[in-house]
Image: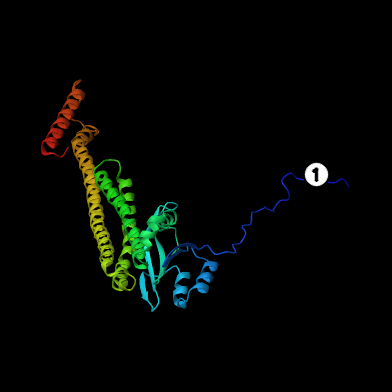
Amino acid sequence: MPSLPRSPFGRRGRATAEVTPERTEPRVEIIESPGLRWFNVERPRSLEQAWLEEHFDFHALDLEDIRSRNQRPKVDEYDEYLFIVLHFPRYDKKVSRLNAAEVDIFVGPDFLITIPNEPLDPISYLFERCRTNEEFRDQLFSKGSGYLLYKIVDDCVDAAFPMLGKIGNKLERIEEAIFEDGEAEDVVRDISNAKQEIINFRKIVRPQRVAFRDLERNKARYLAEDLDIYFDDIIDASERGWDMLENFKEVVEGLEATNESAIAHRTNQTFQVLTAISLIFLPLTLIASFFGMNVHLPFEDSQYAFWIIIAAMLAIVVGVAAFFRRRGWL
């Protein structure tokens, strides 16, 4: 039997896929300075968790919290370290939504470990700056792990204000669009999106306020006395952001009510015009129905009857329209 020609595409049903080799080394970035080390472990997996268990004597519950993705912001105090869980807003461009990025932090007298479960630009930028700028690193690390913790948290809190500014600009655009014709559906959608962003932002910030106050109470362990005021600044910034969210919440609710009133007003205007038009032509319908009857009527034998009726109907239309105009109904 002659052999069949081989297909240039290979056998059907078998697809060649590139297999990514498994990592054998944990992805742990380290910056060292005399007296202080900063470890950054982004998106930890089993290798990174095993590395933490091997190199540090952390409580088992803290290691379990790292594996979990549903932790509330909190500050747990131990004899040798602090374990901190914080959430910060992060805009996901793939789904166009505001999500919470969690970062777990271990703070000791001579070390600090940041474990973000999602990439956070403020932490990545600060870590890279410390890596590349020796003068900045020495200046920052010389003040101890408490000040480094303050700098990380402060940068993450400050990064939320541009997002709040964008929400404020969006509300201003919505306010302008409410009174423009032809954009009712777009305005409703924009109000819904703005409300969702504000709700998500509030869900992130509300529990964080308690964690910041707990952190402010425990700051003295790793912070010099002359640096106490710095953590008060974090609380002030957090409260300022919360006040902005409260204001945005009231504004978007007011815009929603205003938009509903504007839609109702436009609808009433439409019905008013349609009602006026119906009333204008109602007498004409009555006259036409009379002369459409199969009975003897005055002037029906006159050759000018049609034009007389048309003139009378036009006079009625003009008179009723003028009356409605004077009353402001048209």
Question: Which residue sits furthest bottom?
Answer: 79
Q: Quadrant of residue 197?
A: bottom left
Image coordinates for residue 227, horizontal then vertical, percent: 28, 66
Q: Amino acid at mark 1?
A: Pro
Q: Is residue 322 left or right of residue 91?
A: left
Question: Which residue sits furthest top?
Answer: 303
Q: Is residue 274 left or right of residue 200?
A: left
Q: Residues within 10 Å of mark 1 (few under 14, many from 20)?
A: few
Question: Which residue sits furthest right?
Answer: 1
Indicate whether 297 appears above or below 152.
Answer: above
Image coordinates for residue 128, horizontal then vertical, percent: 43, 55
For this rendering, which residue is in front, 159 or 167? 159
Image coordinates for residue 274, horizontal then vertical, percent: 23, 40
Identify which residue is drawn at 41% across, 64% down. 102
Indicate whether 202 appears above or below 14.
Answer: below
* Camera sees residue 324: yes
**SS at badge 1:** loop
For this rendering, which residue is in front, 287 or 89? 89
- Where the C terminus falls, by quadrant? top left
For this rendering, which residue is in front, 326 or 319? 326
Q: What sort of colour scheme is used for the picture?
A: rainbow
Q: How many marks?
A: 1
* Camera sees residue 299: no
Q: Is residue 144 left or right of residue 4?
A: left
Q: Residue at label 1?
A: 5
For this rendering, which residue is in front, 304 or 82? 82
Image coordinates for residue 245, horizontal then vertical, percent: 27, 58
Identify which residue is drawn at 39% across, 57% down. 126
